[in-house]
Image (tube, helix red, strand yellow):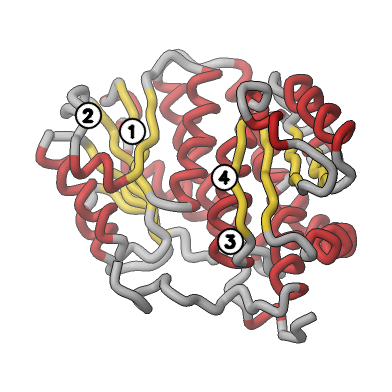
């Protein structure tokens, strides 16, 4: 197994992640609210544009909004949006563009395309002075490295303000009321979950390919971890599957020796996902289960994608180094090869 200093790896779980979340909620989001004023009341549709992990966070927020309000919402790859702007985009559409580096060309193009249709634009970036941030009408600079957590907290907060401006709901008030508990949850998880995830990651490292199955509001996280993280950071082949569609094709390849990561939500898709898990476990012993119920306590199911994240990141980190691969090593990504 590769021996490296985890603190030197570009890793989304750090000792600072809880503090980053706290500063975001205490200082940065109130400042954003003051800057954008009545924007939430001025729009009647929302479109999130991003690439990679930020797109998965956007898709998770889309699920939240679809379940709690009537405001139409969609998430799109920034490349798709820029190439073919949806017909509905107008001056009453809010386009939220997310890019951690702030330099993603497709996201810059998406912001410019949205502005050309008269849309209101809000950028989420990590630092000041980036092309994405400077292209948008409003910008949140979140100044932290734990992007999954920071993106979801920000997007949930923004969704909450939009929902409140369009009638509100008891459910969104519950979710927003529980968001301040996230930093303490993160502190506990950084302290407590690493050992269990290490064991699973080391065990899973013997496989060259792993299928990932997730249900409900964990489906975007399933793609983020089971495709983006696993392929890019661990160089393990795999595919991300929706538990709701597992019986329609994917179940035919379940057999002894075939490995699966299964992410079980606490929302309305829990029983569907558990049914899939039970089927898989009848036919193979190579199953690595991450149940949000073990990590989120009494938190609203909408917060499960945040609560489960730390355990998953530790899992994939140890999966990578057990394969003698530094997660920061790239063959093609980041301009190393023409694309």
Which class describes the residues within 10 Å of circle 3: few (<14), some (14-19), or many (20+)?
Answer: some
Q: From the top left corner, tell me how far across and down residue 259 is, in percent.
A: 77, 48
Q: CA distance from mark 2 to mark 1?
A: 9 Å
- For disc 2, the marked residue is 86
On screen, residue 26 versus residue 308, left or right, reads left
- For disc 1, the marked residue is 47
Which class describes the residues within 10 Å of circle 1: few (<14), some (14-19), or many (20+)?
Answer: many
Q: Residue at x 38, y 29 (%)?
A: 74
Instruction: Classify the position of the C terminus by image quarter.
Output: bottom left
Question: Quick check: marks 2 and 4 in contact, CB under 8 Å?
Answer: no
Q: From the top left corner, tell me how far across and down residue 305 is, in percent.
A: 65, 41
Q: Residue at x 33, y 47 (%)?
A: 97
The answer to which of marks 3 and 2 sits earlier in the sequence is 2
Question: Quick check: marks 3 and 2 in contact, CB under 8 Å?
Answer: no
- For disc 4, the marked residue is 223
- For disc 3, the marked residue is 146
The answer to which of marks 2 and 1 sits earlier in the sequence is 1
């Amino acid at each position: 197994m590769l021996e490296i200093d985890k603190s030197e790896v570009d890793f989304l779980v750090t000792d600072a992640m809880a503090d980053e979340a706290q500063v975001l909620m205490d200082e940065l989001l109130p400042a954003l609210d003051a800057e954008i004023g009545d924007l939430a009341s001025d729009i009647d549709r929302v479109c999130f544009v991003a690439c990679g992990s930020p797109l998965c966070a956007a898709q998770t927020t889309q699920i939240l909004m679809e379940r709690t309000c009537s405001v139409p919402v969609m998430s799109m790859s920034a490349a798709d949006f820029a190439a073919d702007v949806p017909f509905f985009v107008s001056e009453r559409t809010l386009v939220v563009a997310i890019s951690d580096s702030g330099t993603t060309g497709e996201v810059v193009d998406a912001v410019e395309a949205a502005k050309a249709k008269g849309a209101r634009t809000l950028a989420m970036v990590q630092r000041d002075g980036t092309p994405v941030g400077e292209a948008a009408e409003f910008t949140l600079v979140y100044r932290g490295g734990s992007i999954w957590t920071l993106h979801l907290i920000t997007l949930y907060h923004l969704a909450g303000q939009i929902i409140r401006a369009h009638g509100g709901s008891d459910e969104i008030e519950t979710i927003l009321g529980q968001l301040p508990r996230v930093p303490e949850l993160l502190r506990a998880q950084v302290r407590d979950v690493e050992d269990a995830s290490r064991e699973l990651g080391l065990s899973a490292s013997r496989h060259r390919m792993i299928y990932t199955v997730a249900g409900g509001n964990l489906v975007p996280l399933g793609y983020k971890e089971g495709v983006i993280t696993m392929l890019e950071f661990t160089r393990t082949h795999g595919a991300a599957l929706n538990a709701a569609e597992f019986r329609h094709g994917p179940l035919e390849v379940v057999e002894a020796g075939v490995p699966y990561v299964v992410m079980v939500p606490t929302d309305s898709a829990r029983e569907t996902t558990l049914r899939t898990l039970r089927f898989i476990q009848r036919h193979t012993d190579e199953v690595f289960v991450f149940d949000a119920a073990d990590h989120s306590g009494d938190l609203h199911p909408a917060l499960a994608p945040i609560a489960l994240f730390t355990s998953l990141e530790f899992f994939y980190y140890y999966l990578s180094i057990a394969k003698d691969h530094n997660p920061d090593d790239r063959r093609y990504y980041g301009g190393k090869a023409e694309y």
